[in-house]
Image (cartoon, rainbow, N blue to C red):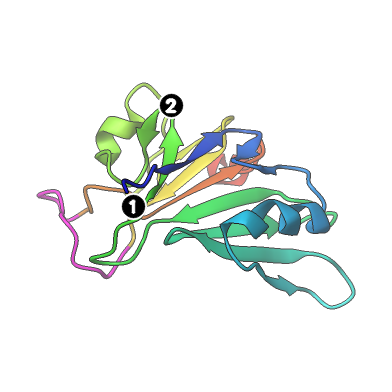
Amino acid sequence: MERTPLDLHLEPPHGAGPVRLGMSFDEAVAAVVPWGEPRTRVRPGTRRGGVSTACAGIGVQVHLEEDDRVTAVEFWRPGEGRTSAARVLLGGRDVFTTPADELLAGFDVHDGDGEDPFVPGLSLGFTRRTSQEVPRRPDGLPVHFTSVLVGGADYYDFRLR
């Protein structure tokens, strides 16, 4: 029987899949339960912290950084040599299998050192950082992203200063 991929759609700056920015801690936990057993970490006396799980090998981290509400959701590609039936999609393109330069074409990207580009306003953040053996460009940067984060519209404003 052929497996149908599970598509996790990024919807910046509103959320990703069933996880919406602004959700409460309890809503965030409930949203990720279908993907796997959620693990939580909270600061004492608050609901600030995070909820993490994995969806078919894709790591998921839901950040609750302010007012006990979801401020960002982040996805991590499966580790070296692993594949996943799940796909993290941005505009119909798989974030972890589409070459990074191709994925970012047409966006107003702030790149810095190339390892951690972000798109302000949409508040999409990416990383290529990895110690794994992966295909690399001639300059040494990995060809593909290793993670993607969707935050609120002003999530990356601090990096513009």
Mark 2 element type: loop
27 shown above or below 47: above
Query: Residue at horizontal 85%, vertical 54%?
Result: 67
Indicate the position of residue 45 as horizontal and vertical percent values: 90, 75
Residue at image mark 1: 115
Query: Residue at horizontal 26%, vertical 31%?
Result: 102
Examine the residues drawn in magenta and state their main secondary structure: loop
Indicate the position of residue 94 as horizontal and vertical percent values: 35, 38
Residue 114 drawn in magenta: no
The magenta stretch is: 130-140
97 shown above or below 129: above
Q: Amino acid at mark 1?
A: Glu
Q: Residue furthest bottom?
A: 44
Q: CA distance from mark 1 to mark 2?
A: 21 Å
Is residue 127 rendered to the left or right of residue 25?
left
> In which quadrant is the C terminus drawn?
top right
Instruction: From the viewer's side, name the closer residue of 13 and 86.
Output: 86
Res. 91 mark: 2
Is the residue marked by circle 1 packed among few (<14), some (14-19), or many (20+) residues within 10 Å? Answer: some
Instruction: From the viewer's side, name the closer residue of 113 and 142.
Output: 142
Residue 52, by quadrant, is bottom right
Indicate the position of residue 1 as horizontal and vertical percent values: 32, 49
Q: Earlier in the sequence, mark 1 or mark 2?
A: 2
Q: Amino acid at mark 2?
A: Gly
* Labels 1 & 2 near each other (Cβ < 8 A): no
